[in-house]
Image (tube, grey):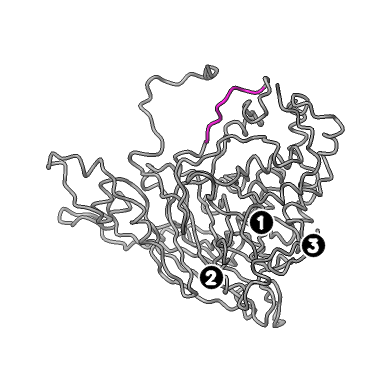
Amino acid sequence: MPKPLLQVLFATALFTATGLTAHGSSHREALAILNEPCADNTDTYAWVSPGSHDKLYLIMNFNPLHEPGQGNQGLRACNGYRYEFHIGIGASLKDKLVYRVEFKNTLTPEAPPSSTDALGGGNELLWQLTGGAETMTVSRTVPLKGGNLDDDSDGDGDLDGDGFDRRVVVLGKDLPVLPNNHGPQTDRLVYGLGAFAGYDSGDPTSREVGLYDQAFVDTFIHPLGNGGRVIAGQFDDPYQLDEKGIFDLVNLNTDDLGGIPGARRPPGKDVFTGFNLFSIALEIPISDIFPQGIPHNGVLKADSTDSLLRVWSSISRQRMQSVDPSNIITGLKGSGAFVQVGRNALPLFNAGLVGTQRQTRYLRSSPLKDVTNFGADILFPVLVRDAEALGIYKALGVPAGTVTTLKGPRTDIINAINLGRPIPVADGFTGDVITLDAAIDSSFPNGRRLGGGAAPNRNQVNVNSVLIGLIVAGNPAAGLAKGIEVNDKDYLDRFPFLAPAHQGLYQGHGGINVPTEQTPPPPTP
């Protein structure tokens, strides 16, 4: 028998009190981002170290759905973009600090090839043999005179530009980026991880046994000038979702819908299995943010906002991009002011709440204006009417009056993302940010961490189910859209927490194309 969802009215208290740490994402969710993968940030994580809360961990994932074996079409650090973590303090969303990471790829030009050339250089067909370098610079930006980065504290009309209202401190310069996990021969010939024996040796070991491991990855963790650490490069995509079903007009299977017979047969499949993406992971001493210490550290004060951090990530580039044949890396030259072209914070916000015609506006705008720009998307969630049209509520026995209530206005959703704290529901205060209380251990929606579940490949809670349950049923524990609840690789239990990238040669995707696929495919047996 289907499980009736009878307790679906505004269960925010359950959502807030249970301390749910979760996982969710926004892969290629907006029309504008399809042509700009370097600006497609899929997930943002922010949490404090448990117990002492003396470190803040920040992770930004972008450039998703990379097939590990795509070689030169694989992940490269993106030149010309600024990747930034924005941090507000208290009830306000205004920036108090910004951590910025900028990448630089270099490749020395050389003359056309000749018969006497040595191995390597820009004439090689494969990037890892060219001698090209990928590096990053990490900086921290703070306001002058104790203001906000959005304030014009010196009256010169420069709000958040490169003038005198901010102080930029470089924390690390020209730091090497973690290279891609191509396969066994690259491990030996380029990364120097073992002795190489050619085809003429008669021994296939150098072509079959990979040496790219966690110890190698760890050599690209760099110390920063503020006592923190950073790593950036290719990692396993840590997100799980039966997205095939989602994009067939929310075609969920019976396991996602309490066993109702009208749903398709399980299992759901994680569409992100075997894919890599690009990640930036930062470890920041909490003294960078609270120089005098976290207010009432270790004590929950539910009526207070003084220990709250309001975190979101953005990606920017220069407004004008012109064709530049002399740029052998990107073929482009940027000019003009830097403009935001991507952002992310709460999982599924843009993909699960904001309507298609406003998703590009979301990417280009600041959370400071989210109430004006997207308030109606939150108060009147479209997913509810979609679920009604598909017959989900009738199949689950949900009363018509309850469905009407779920259509809005849904102040419970807003209260949940604000952690039930006294935060005004107004521009500049409420928006798509990760809100975390630095005084207590992080647990979603109070922050968002990676991993931390009952097994190394699990998160504490499946955020897809939590958030879709909250939106569609008014109850994060409704058990909807559970889908896939394990990652295809184990997370680390320490910095940088991300799983290493899938190897290009023996992992990822591919097939022998026998037998050929049918169109349309036959039903699942």
Residue 206 falls inside the magenta stretch: no
**Marks 2 and 1 close (CB-CB < 8 Å):** no
Q: Residue at x 75, y 25 (%)?
A: 391
Main SS of residues in magenta:
loop
Please, is residue 268 above or below residue 347 in the view? above
Quarter of the picture holding the N terminus: top right
Please, is residue 342 above or below residue 401 in the view? below
Q: Which residues, given as a range, are shown in magenta?
A: 263-270
C-alpha distance separating marks 2 and 1: 19 Å
* Amino acid type for the residue under numbered disc 1: Asn
* Amino acid type for the residue under numbered disc 2: Pro
Q: Which residue is mark 1?
A: 446
Query: What is the quadrant of residue 255 in the picture?
Result: top right
Query: What is the quadrant of residue 465 in the picture?
Result: top right
In primary-sequence order, the first of circles 1 and 3 is 3
Residue 323: where, in percent of width, then height?
48, 57
In primary-sequence order, the first of circles 2 and 1 is 2
SS category of the residue bearing label 2: strand
In the image, farthest residue toward the left: 201
Horizontally, residue 369 falls left or right of residue 509, namely right
SS category of the residue bearing label 3: loop
Residue 441: where, in percent of width, then height?
61, 60
Q: Residue at x 36, y 46 (%)?
A: 71
SS category of the residue bearing label 1: loop
Q: Residues within 10 Å of mark 3 (few under 14, many from 20)?
A: few
Residue 268 falls inside the magenta stretch: yes
Horizontally, residue 497 falls left or right of residue 88, namely left
Q: Which residue is mark 2?
A: 285
Q: Residue at x 55, y 36 (%)?
A: 484
Q: Residue 422 has which mark?
A: 3
- Is residue 318 visible from the viewing direction of this image? no
